[in-house]
């Protein structure tokens, strides 16, 4: 019997070249994971800081397949329009920046070849089922996000002896009032009912060692309660959950593999009514 023909070999995809903006708690961990080869299919192309020149930024973005913003809301406001204008995707960690705009897509460059904004789930999960529930019907839905952190992470200087509610309002107001600690609320809002219909309660608790998140959803399609307790990154002053950087790495790994985890995607298309993402 003649030998069977061998199966064609799949071409090895080129590695995803990643430019990282910021080298703090999140950016530093993402940089380290890329350098150590812990994100299969992706490699570090450049690190951009506040001291980077315009020519350095332009060269890094031109060479990148994807940019990771891990700096600040001001950095996000600067990079999102410029990066998406080149047709390049940008992973935005400081998603509180979208609270400054009536429509989150206002920050994206216009045009048919605009790059996408990818918002990682970060400190919470379940955005896939909650996003699906929002698509099933948002008019009769409610969503509430509790964040419980140590007082110093919320800039509460007073010596508390018991938990204290320091904020209650919309995700938009939370992001404007607590821009460094409300990214999870904004990601939840973008995935579900939007910034003005997502209720956020922020609690300062002197007895917590980890950051706690509780998400409550109710609508005709179902009732869900999700709880997360995250270790904090020691370099973040208690503001950032250690899992956040690995959420970013998960997004990069999924992009490199041509698949996608539960991320929030903003494109230049028309918004979907009652749902902040666009297909």
Image (tube, grey):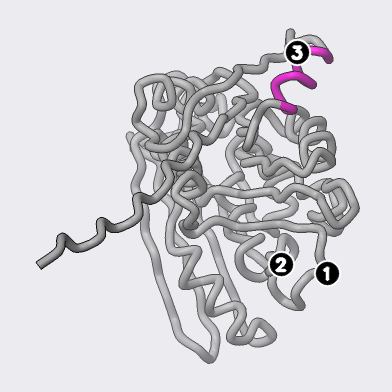
Mark 2 and mark 1 residues within 8 Å of each other at the beta carbon: yes
Question: Residue 194's image quarter?
Answer: bottom right
> Residue 153: percent from the left, percent from the top?
52, 30
Measured in 3D between alpha carbons, the distance from the residue under mark 2 to the one under mark 1, in whole angstroms, is: 7 Å
Looking at the image, which residue sits at the far front?
A: 1
Residue identifier under label 1: 270
Residue 112 falls in which quadrant of the image?
A: bottom right
Q: Position of residue 273 (x, y in %)?
A: 76, 78
Does 84 sit above or below residue 145? Answer: above
Q: Earlier in the sequence, mark 1 or mark 3?
A: 3
Q: Depth check: 84 or 141 in front?
A: 84
Q: Nearer the viewer, mark 3 or mark 2?
A: 3
Does the segment drawn in magenta span residue 87?
A: no
Question: Label 1's element?
Answer: loop
* In the image, residue 3 above or below residue 129: above
Q: Position of residue 261 (x, y in %)?
A: 46, 57
Q: Quadrant of the N terminus?
A: bottom left
Magenta stretch, main secondary structure class? helix
Classify residue 80 as left or right of residue 189. right
Instruction: Identify residue for label 3.
Output: 56
Crowdedness near tag 1: few (<14), some (14–19) or many (≥20) residues, C-alpha within 10 Å? few
The residue carrying mark 2 is 278
Mark 2 and mark 1 lie on one chain; the one further toward the N terminus is 1
Q: Is residue 263 visible?
A: yes
- Range shown magenta: 54-62
Residue 205 is situated, as x and y percent measured from the top left of the image, at 43, 40
Q: Is residue 182 left or right of residue 203?
A: right
User: Residue 162, can we see it?
Assistant: no
| Dot placed on the residue nearer the N-terminal end, 3 or 2 | 3
Within-10-Å neighbours for mark 3: few <14, some 14–19, many 20+: some
């Amino acid at each position: 019997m003649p030998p069977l023909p061998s199966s064609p070999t799949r071409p090895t995809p080129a590695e995803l070249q990643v430019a990282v903006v910021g080298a703090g708690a999140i950016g530093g961990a993402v940089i380290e994971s890329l350098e150590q080869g812990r994100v299969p299919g992706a490699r570090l192309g450049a690190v951009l800081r506040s001291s980077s020149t315009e020519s350095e930024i332009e060269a890094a973005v031109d060479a990148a397949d994807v940019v990771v913003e891990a700096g600040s809301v001001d950095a996000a406001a600067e990079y999102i329009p410029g990066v998406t204008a080149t047709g390049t995707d940008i992973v935005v960690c400081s998603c509180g920046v979208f609270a400054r705009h009536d429509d989150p897509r206002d920050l994206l460059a216009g045009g048919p070849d605009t790059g996408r904004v990818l918002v990682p789930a970060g400190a919470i999960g379940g955005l896939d089922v909650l996003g699906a529930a929002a698509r099933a019907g948002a008019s009769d839905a409610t969503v509430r996000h509790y964040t419980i952190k140590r007082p110093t992470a919320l800039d509460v200087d007073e010596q508390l002896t018991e938990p204290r509610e320091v904020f209650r309002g919309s995700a938009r107001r939370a992001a404007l009032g607590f821009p460094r600690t409300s990214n999870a609320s904004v990601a939840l809002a973008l995935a579900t009912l939007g910034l003005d219909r997502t209720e956020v309660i922020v609690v300062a608790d002197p007895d917590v060692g980890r950051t706690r998140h509780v998400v409550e959803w109710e609508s005709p399609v179902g009732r869900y309660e999700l709880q997360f307790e995250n270790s904090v990154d020691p370099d973040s002053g208690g503001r950032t959950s250690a899992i956040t950087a690995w959420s970013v790495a998960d997004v990069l790994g999924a992009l490199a593999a041509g698949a996608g985890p539960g991320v929030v995607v903003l494109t230049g298309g028309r918004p979907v009514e009652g749902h902040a993402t666009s297909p």
